[in-house]
Image: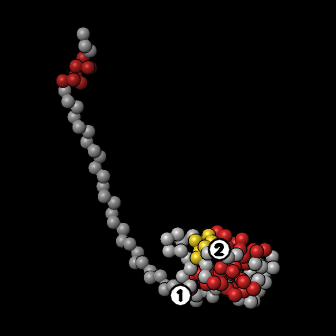
Amino acid sequence: MPTPKKSAKKGAKAAPKKKAAKKAAPKKKAAPKKKAAPKKKAAPKKKAAKKPASNTGFNAPLTASPALAAVVGEQPLARTEIIKKIWEYIRKNGLQDKVNKRMINADAKLKTLFDGKGQVSMFDLAKIVSKNVK
């Protein structure tokens, strides 16, 4: 036999709970916003030219062989500058292969530098520079 509590719950619907009425808080008047002072633009900083820390490793000036000097010039340059000058020469004369961009086609000056090869890989430039500097 069911207990009277259970049957009362099943038969009668519970009355919805009333929500407590919330009182709206009185609106506060916002204080007038102060205008921020205009920011002064700082003068652009001048970038100092990068100078090598010392004359060791990549930064040491090297003397180019006659074959290399025909491409990059006679003055002693750092290894990184020599590579940059070679790439300037390659781009100026359109010697990078159109199909395979990793290959460099040799002209008369570069053919002597590349030991008579007509085409070398760009990854071989470091080896070629090493053979032609003191």
Residue at x 61%, y 75% (from the top left corner)? 118
Q: Is residue 29 visible?
A: yes
Instruction: Quadrant for residue 111, please give it.
Output: bottom right
Q: Is residue 27 above or below residue 45?
A: above
70 relative to 9 in the view: left or right: right
Image disc number at residue 3:
none
In the picture, measured across the screen, residue 28 lies left or right of residue 55, that is: left
Viewer-side residue, 125 vs 20: 125
Q: Identify the residue at horizontal 19%, vertical 26% (top origin).
A: 12
Q: Residues within 10 Å of mark 1 (few under 14, many from 20)?
A: few
Q: Where does the N terminus fall, quadrant-wise? A: top left
Q: Amino acid at mark 1?
A: Lys
The numbered mark, 1 or 2, whose residue comes first in the sequence reads: 1
Locate the C terminus by quadrant: bottom right
What is the C-alpha distance between the residues marked 1 and 2? 61 Å
Rendered location of residue 67, percent (x, y): 72, 83
Q: Amino acid at mark 2?
A: Lys
Q: Is residue 134 left or right of residue 97?
A: right
Q: Residue furthest front?
A: 116
Q: Residue at x 71, y 83 (%)?
A: 68
Badge 2 local density, few (<14 within 10 Å), some, or many (20+)?
A: few
Residue tagged 1: 40
Task: Tell me where residue 124 appears, x and y as whole percent.
Answer: 67, 70
The residue sitting at 72% across, 86% down in the picture is 69
- Residue picked out by circle 2: 117
Q: In the structure shown, which secondary structural element does the residue marked by tag 2 occupy?
A: loop
